[in-house]
Image (tube, coloured by chain):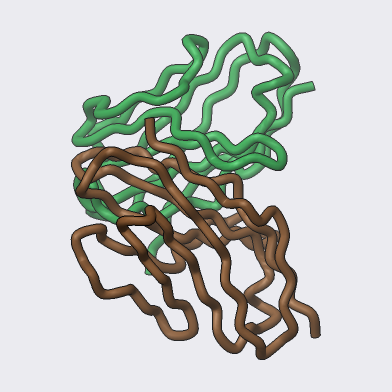
C-alpha cells in the first residue's frame, strides 16, 4: 500500500520569507502523480500544484514550486514570498497512474507571522 | 467558473438515524469521488463513480452506500449513524477517470 508522510506537523514563516514543506512517500509504482493541496480555515480543499512522476522538470505555479526527487521518493513544496493568505493546512497527496483515489499525508499547518 | 456543489453544508443527526449527502459535479465532469475527513485528520477516500458505475472503493463502511445518477450527481447514503461518523465529507469531481480532482466545500456532519 502506498503511504505518504509529512514529518512536520507545524511550520511558521515570517511574511515575505520562503518556507519549504517536506513530504516523502512510499510506492513500488513507477507511474504516479503527486499533489499539494491547501486547506485554509474555510476547510475548502484547494489544489496548489501537481507533479507527474515521469516528468523530470519540477512543477512551478507562481510563488509555489516543488523539489521532486523520484529516487529518494521526496516531494517538497517551496513557498516564496509568503503571504498572510498562505496560512493553511497543507496536504501532500499521491495517486497511482490509472487509479483514482488520492492518498493524503497527515498535513502540515503553516502559520505566517506578520 | 462553476464549482462542485454539495448539499447540505451542515447536517446534525442523532445516533442510529440516516443521512443523505448530495454532490453536483462541475458541468461535463463524469467522475465523482467521496472522501471523509475526521477532526484533525487527513481525508480518507470512500468511493468513486465513473459514468454512473462504481469505479473504485476505499474504506467505506457497509452502513454507507452511494450512487451516481444519470445527470452525474451523486448521493452518499449513511444509515445507523454512529458518533464516529461525525466528519467533513468532501465530494470531488474530474473530467474522466484519472483527471484532476476538484473538491467541493464539504458537508459537515455532526452525529449526537
Q: Position of residue A112 (x, y in %)?
A: 74, 76
Residue at image coords 68%, 70%: A87
Task: From this view, report whether residue A107 is shown above or below residue A20.
Answer: above
Taking depth in this image into account, of A80 and A71 the one nearest to the observer is: A71
Taking depth in this image into account, of A86 and B83 the one nearest to the observer is: A86
Residue at image coords 34%, 48%: B93
Q: Quadrant of residue A108?
A: bottom right
Among all residues in the image, which is located at the extreme front? Answer: A72
The number of discs equals 0
Give the position of the N terminus of chain B as an image quadrant.
bottom left
Give the position of the C terminus of chain B as an image quadrant.
top right
Residue at image coords 58%, 59%: A90
Taking depth in this image into account, of B68 and B103 the one nearest to the observer is: B103
Residue at image coords 66%, 64%: A88
Q: Position of residue A14 (x, y in %)?
A: 74, 83
Q: Quadrant of residue A102?
A: top left
Q: Position of residue B103 (x, y in %)?
A: 45, 52
The brown chain is A
Task: From this view, report whether residue B44 is shown above or below residue B62.
Answer: below
Q: Position of residue B84 (x, y in %)?
A: 69, 21
Give chain B's shade.
Answer: green
* Residue A60 horizontal side relative to residue B7, left or right: left
Taking depth in this image into account, of B7 and A47 the one nearest to the observer is: A47
Task: From this view, report whether residue A6 is shown above or below residue B112.
Answer: below
* Residue B28 horizontal side relative to residue B5, left or right: left
Amino acid at each position: 500500500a502506498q503511504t505518504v508522510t509529512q514529518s512536520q506537523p507545524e511550520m511558521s514563516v515570517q511574511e515575505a520569507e520562503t518556507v519549504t514543506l517536506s513530504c516523502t512517500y512510499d510506492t513500488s509504482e513507477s507511474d504516479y502523480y503527486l499533489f499539494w493541496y491547501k486547506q485554509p480555515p474555510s476547510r475548502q480543499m484547494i489544489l496548489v500544484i501537481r507533479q507527474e512522476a515521469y516528468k523530470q522538470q519540477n512543477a512551478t505555479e507562481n510563488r509555489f514550486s516543488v523539489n521532486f526527487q523520484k529516487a529518494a521518493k521526496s516531494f517538497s513544496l517551496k513557498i516564496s514570498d509568503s503571504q498572510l493568505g498562505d496560512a493553511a493546512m497543507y496536504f501532500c497527496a499521491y495517486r497511482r497512474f490509472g487509479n483514482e483515489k488520492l492518498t493524503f499525508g497527515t498535513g502540515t499547518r503553516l502559520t505566517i507571522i506578520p | 467558473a462553476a464549482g462542485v456543489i454539495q448539499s447540505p453544508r451542515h447536517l446534525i443527526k442523532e445516533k442510529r438515524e440516516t443521512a443523505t449527502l448530495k454532490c453536483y459535479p462541475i458541468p461535463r465532469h463524469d467522475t465523482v469521488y467521496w472522501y471523509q475527513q475526521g477532526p484533525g485528520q487527513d481525508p480518507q477516500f470512500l468511493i468513486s463513480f465513473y459514468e454512473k458505475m462504481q469505479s473504485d472503493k476505499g474504506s467505506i463502511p457497509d452502513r454507507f452506500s452511494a450512487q451516481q445518477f444519470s445527470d452525474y450527481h451523486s448521493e452518499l447514503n449513511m444509515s445507523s449513524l454512529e458518533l464516529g461518523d461525525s466528519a467533513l465529507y468532501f465530494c470531488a469531481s474530474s473530467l474522466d477517470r484519472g483527471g484532476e480532482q476538484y473538491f467541493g466545500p464539504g458537508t459537515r456532519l455532526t452525529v449526537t
